[in-house]
Amino acid sequence: MSKKPIIGISGSVQISEKGLFAGHRRACVGNNYVEAVIAAGGIPFIIPINADEDVIRGAVDAIDALIMSGGHDVSPICYNEEPMQKLEATFLERDKFDSLLIGEAQKKGKPILGICRGVQILNVVNGGTLYQDVSYAKDVFIQHFQKTKSDDLSHSVKIDKNSFLGDIFDGEETGLINSFHHQILKDVAPGFRVIAQSPDGAIEGIQKDCDDNLIVGLQWHPELLAANNIPAQKIFKKFIKYVTEK
Ligand SMILES: [Mn+2]
């Protein structure tokens, strides 16, 4: 592929709260995703939430790879659990859309990078489950929703050197990341393996075991770090390089 690859980014919806446009829905995505993709040599292509399966299929046909963006909690309906007390806002319409996008991208062999909610829905769509809040996971003691700026590093992760993350942290087995999540993966989906964990055992990254496609998910937010952090930039560059060479 000689042209820059087109990187689809799953969208969200923001609803205006006041004024003339109260209740008005706006398709949106955090601009950091857009900037990180451009800086890494890709063409960002925002895919708005919709329920039309033909449109979703067509959107996946039009992209070379897919980034599943962060956001709402995945509804526990998607993994056959009742909502627990600490579950936060869910968005079933987005769960449905994301599930169709991931299913279609996997079917068509398009590389996927899931970020935060993106890794959670990637896991659930493939048969995994989540802890609805980190406090429900035994031994998890680290603050996973940091109180500092989004581009501040917060906690460490240990990575699997034989994975997508192998050369991201300057060849080291541990790295520092940011952390803005209150849920974590519980059962990892069949066919996926853990590639990053925080010192309390929380799963911070997974990768699908397959040779013919790259499907990886991270619990942290490299897009929020990418302006100034080399490992975060490497994540996007490595993903886009894979797409370009595929
Ligand atoms: Mn974390």
Image (spheres, rainbow, N blue to C red):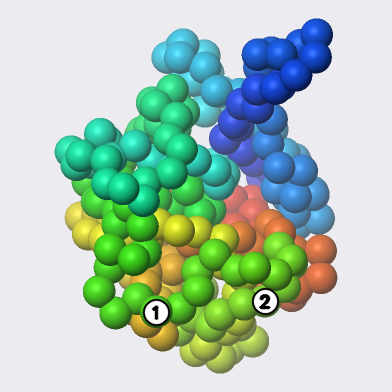
Q: Please tell me whether mark 1 sits on a helix, a strand or a loop.
A: loop
Residue 60 in the image, given as x and y percentages of width and height:
52, 28
Query: Quick one: label 2, few (<14), some, or many (20+) residues within 10 Å?
Result: some
| Farthest-out residue, bottom | 172
Q: Residue at x 69, y 30 (%)?
A: 28
Q: Residue at x 71, y 13 (%)?
A: 22
When the figure is inspected, residue 165 is found, relative to residue 222, above or below; the finding is below
Q: Residue at x 80, y 8 (%)?
A: 20
Instruction: Please indicate whether residue 147 sits to the left or right of residue 195 in the image.
Output: right
The residue wearing badge 1 is 141
Residue 181 in the image, given as x and y percentages of width and height:
50, 59
When the figure is inspected, residue 241 is found, relative to residue 1, above or below; the finding is below
Q: Nearer the viewer, residue 28 or 235?
A: 28
Task: Locate residue 234: give its quadrant.
Answer: bottom right
Q: Residue at x 45, y 30 (%)?
A: 91
Query: Quick one: label 1, few (<14), some, or many (20+) residues within 10 Å?
Result: few
Residue 71 in the image, given as x and y percentages of width and height:
54, 43
| Cα–Cα span, label 2 and label 1 | 17 Å
Q: Please tell me whether mark 2 sits on a helix, a strand or a loop.
A: loop
Residue 76 in the image, given as x and y percentages of width and height:
28, 40
Question: Of marks 2 and 1, which one's residue comes earlier in the chain?
Answer: 1
Instruction: Please indicate whether residue 175 sits to the left or right of residue 223 in the image.
Output: left
